[in-house]
């Protein structure tokens, strides 16, 4: 495959779809480029539990024999799920856009539930345009409308758990907020009293209660094949009484009502997507503290790349909208992305690793 062919894997879904519709690209070439890149990186990344290259190529060839139909004809797509933070946080760690829609927006037929009260189909892409197009294709969300960041009413939420975030993540969130303010957004502090440990604990209780019931058959019949952590979580869920579950549900409903009222004064909330860069090793995917409350509230959220942290890995911020306002949330996210695009974001420590001073023969890019 030529070097030009290699570069095809860098196309976003929206770009690739336009190229296929215009006859400048075919699905087989796109899929081959993606498979080539996977073959290069998989020995190090080990991302795939299962990959059927021949099946993927077969589907691509079949799409190429057809006239383009649909918004994403012939484009390989990425879905995720989120019960706590499993779309937003991995996207943040990988430097891509992750979008958790409003609860129930994308049909969940065929999904093995983890906690039915929260399980949401998430969408992943290189940019907001990609996830917006995917949402349009699978859920009928309106195409992303053009809007300017000027006048966008942003609530900056560092939250009760601010100290969990790394210094680099805190500095980057504040820097992004300042950059948006300089571009004309109206940024104000947003620290609601109800977004506290109580809501986080309510989410945990409802999630574990749901997990225990969704996984009871596996627990009863194949307990020895479940991980120790999973077994412990099922047992915790089984120990939660129906009364405790009901109290947690009532608190979550009250907080959802409070969040909906915020839409009268804000267009969305800017907050952390994750505590910082991806943690080392495979033992943990990191703390989900900055995801739980928004998942509990059923609101749409997007992880937006915001440069590089101290370890040379991606950082991100999170844009949070209001339940049922996914089109508006995506439009605002696209406006924020446009302001952030083109900025070289480095922490001081990362800058020392990637950039040389003029006296060493280089200048800042």
Image (cartoon, rainbow, N blue to C red):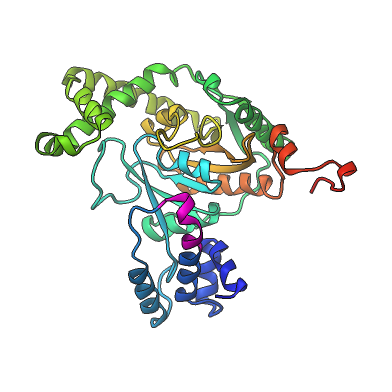
Q: Is residue 105 above or below residue 33?
A: above
In the figure, is residue 116 to the left or right of 147? left
In the figure, is residue 210 to the left or right of 285? left
Residue 105: where, in percent of width, then height? 35, 47
| 365 and 188: which is toward the camera | 365
Q: Residue furthest left?
A: 221
Name the residue: 23% across, 52% down.
Answer: 110
> Was residue 174 drawn as part of the magenta stretch in this picture?
no
| 221 and 109: which is toward the camera | 221
> Was residue 46 drawn as part of the magenta stretch in this picture?
yes
| Residues shaded magenta | 37-47
Q: Is residue 69 visible?
A: yes
> Where is residue 68, by image quadrant?
bottom left
| 228 and 156: which is toward the camera | 228
Name the residue: 52% across, 29% down.
Answer: 275
From the image, which quarter does the N terminus lie in? bottom right
Residue 158: where, in percent of width, then height? 56, 24
The secondary structure that most of the magenta stretch takes on is: helix
In the figure, is residue 340 to the left or right of 135? right
Residue 120: where, in percent of width, then height? 34, 43
In the figure, is residue 182 to the left or right of 30? right
Q: Count numbered badges in the picture.
A: 0
């Amino acid at each position: 495959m030529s070097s030009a062919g290699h570069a095809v894997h860098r196309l976003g879904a929206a770009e690739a779809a336009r190229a296929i519709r215009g006859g400048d690209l075919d699905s087989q070439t796109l899929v081959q480029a993606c498979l080539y890149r996977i073959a290069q990186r998989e020995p190090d990344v080990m991302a795939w539990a299962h990959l059927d290259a021949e099946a993927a190529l077969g589907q691509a060839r079949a799409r190429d024999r057809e006239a383009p139909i649909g918004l994403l004809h012939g484009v390989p797509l990425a879905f995720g799920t989120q019960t706590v933070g499993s779309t937003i946080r991995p996207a943040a760690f990988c430097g891509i856009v992750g979008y958790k829609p409003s609860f129930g927006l994308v049909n969940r037929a065929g999904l093995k539930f983890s906690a039915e009260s929260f399980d949401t189909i998430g969408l992943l892409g290189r940019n907001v345009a990609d996830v917006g197009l995917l949402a349009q294709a699978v859920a009928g969300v309106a195409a992303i409308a053009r809007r300017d960041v000027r006048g966008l009413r942003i609530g900056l939420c560092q939250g009760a758990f601010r100290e969990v975030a790394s210094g680099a993540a805190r500095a980057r969130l504040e820097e992004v907020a300042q950059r948006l303010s300089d571009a004309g957004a109206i940024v104000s502090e947003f620290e609601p009293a109800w977004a506290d440990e109580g809501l986080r604990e309510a989410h945990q209780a409802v999630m574990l209660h749901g997990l225990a019931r969704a996984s009871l058959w596996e627990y009863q019949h194949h307990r020895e094949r479940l991980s120790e952590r999973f077994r412990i979580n099922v047992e915790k869920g089984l120990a939660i009484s129906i009364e405790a579950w009901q109290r947690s549900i009532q608190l979550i409903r009250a907080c959802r009502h409070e969040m909906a009222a915020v839409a009268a004064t804000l267009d969305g909330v800017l907050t952390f997507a994750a505590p910082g860069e991806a943690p080392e090793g495979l033992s943990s995917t990191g703390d989900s503290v900055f995801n739980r409350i928004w998942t509990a509230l059923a609101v749409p959220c997007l992880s937006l790349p915001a440069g590089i942290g101290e370890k040379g890995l991606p950082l991100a911020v999170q844009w949070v909208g209001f339940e049922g306002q996914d089109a508006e949330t995506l439009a605002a996210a696209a406006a924020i992305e446009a302001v952030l695009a083109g900025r070289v974001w480095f922490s001081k420590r990362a800058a020392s690793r990637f950039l040389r001073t003029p006296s060493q023969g280089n200048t800042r890019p």
